[in-house]
């Protein structure tokens, strides 16, 4: 049971960062206390007559994902994808700024437009298994590669530039996760794990996590479906809550 629990913990960290598996973070060397895991205990639901063993195990886990893990993952993406660059590896990419998160210290190649954004973000839980990240404020330094300038593109607004940046980031996330899944005996593609969609007009990124991803790490018939049911953040990282369905 402990092994199953830690697999779920590792996957939750993956989903919060959106791109890779536990081994890509070096999570194997982290303990539950390192990640701030608080198990609320295994709940024994009412017996289900249809189940051979009389019922399924319930689970309720709180998980903290430190910002340093997210910074490490950003560096890993930068090393494998030339479209995303961490400008200074000694500085953070993600940090808290009051009631918001701040993302900076990166450069994104959005089709030849080099963008170094500083984003103030408001992440929140839209519903079960659904996260949203709204861009509250943005500062953008952008420049065009010579071949892009010579193409005579029309003047782009901040909204247009951010849409290009988010499109590039989403593609990079999918490519990185697909590569990781292909290297492991998991019959899933990136879009089976998480669906990402950027709403240009609302300046909001929507992420829907699939319970199929968690199901791959749990023996069949052991417990009910697991879902992301809570999200918050502190000065040091993100906090996720994962529960079995009632």
Image: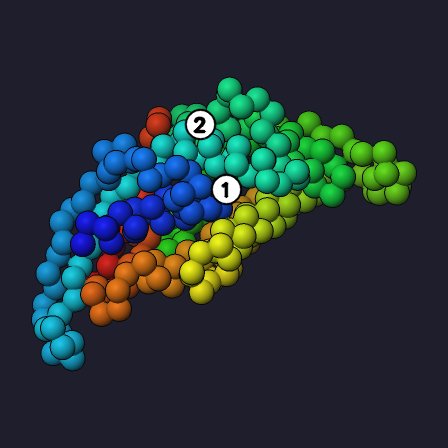
Identify which residue is drawn at 58% across, 29% down.
86
> Mark 1 = which residue?
134
Residue 163 location (% of width, % of height): 65, 45
Name the residue nearer the viewer: 162 or 16: 16
Residue 120 location (% of width, % of height): 51, 31
**Is residue 166 visible in this depiction of the protein?**
no
Q: Is residue 144 left or right of residue 225?
A: right
Q: Is residue 142 above or below residue 174?
A: above
Q: Is residue 144 above or below residue 243?
A: above
Q: Is residue 10 above or below residue 113?
A: below
Task: Give the crowd class for mark 2: few <14, some 14-19, many >=20 residues within 10 Å.
Answer: many
| Res 38 label | none
Q: Quadrant of the N terminus?
A: bottom left
Q: Is residue 24 left or right of residue 84?
A: left
Identify which residue is drawn at 51% across, 57% down.
182
The kind of secondary structure element at disc 2 is strand
Residue 117 location (% of width, % of height): 61, 31
Identify which residue is drawn at 49% across, 51% down.
180
Q: Quadrant of the C terminus?
A: bottom left
> Mark 2 = which residue?
95
Name the residue nearer the viewer: 72 or 118: 72
Identify which residue is drawn at 25% across, 36% down.
31
């Amino acid at each position: 049971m402990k092994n199953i629990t830690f697999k779920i913990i590792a996957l939750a960290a993956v989903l919060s960062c959106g791109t890779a598996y536990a081994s890509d973070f070096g999570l194997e060397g982290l303990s539950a206390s390192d990640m701030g895991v608080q198990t609320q205990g295994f709940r024994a639901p009412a017996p289900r007559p249809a189940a051979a063993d009389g019922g399924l195990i319930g689970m309720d886990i709180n998980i903290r994902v430190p910002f340093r893990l997210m910074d490490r993952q950003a560096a890993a993406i930068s090393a494998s994808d030339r479209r995303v660059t961490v400008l200074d590896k000694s500085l953070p990419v993600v940090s808290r700024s009051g009631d918001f998160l701040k993302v900076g210290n990166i450069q994104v190649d959005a089709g030849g437009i080099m963008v170094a954004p500083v984003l103030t973000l408001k992440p929140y839980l839209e519903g079960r298994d659904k996260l949203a990240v709204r861009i509250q404020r943005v500062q953008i330094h952008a420049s065009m590669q010579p071949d892009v300038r010579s193409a005579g593109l029309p003047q782009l607004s901040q909204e247009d530039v951010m849409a290009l940046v988010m499109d590039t980031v989403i593609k990079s996330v999918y490519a990185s996760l697909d590569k990781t899944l292909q290297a492991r005996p998991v019959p899933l593609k990136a879009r089976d794990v998480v669906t990402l969609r950027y709403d240009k007009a609302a300046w909001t990124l929507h992420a829907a996590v699939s319970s199929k991803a968690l199901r791959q790490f749990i023996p069949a018939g052991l417990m009910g479906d697991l879902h992301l049911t809570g999200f918050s953040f502190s000065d040091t990282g993100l906090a996720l809550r994962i529960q079995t369905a009632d």
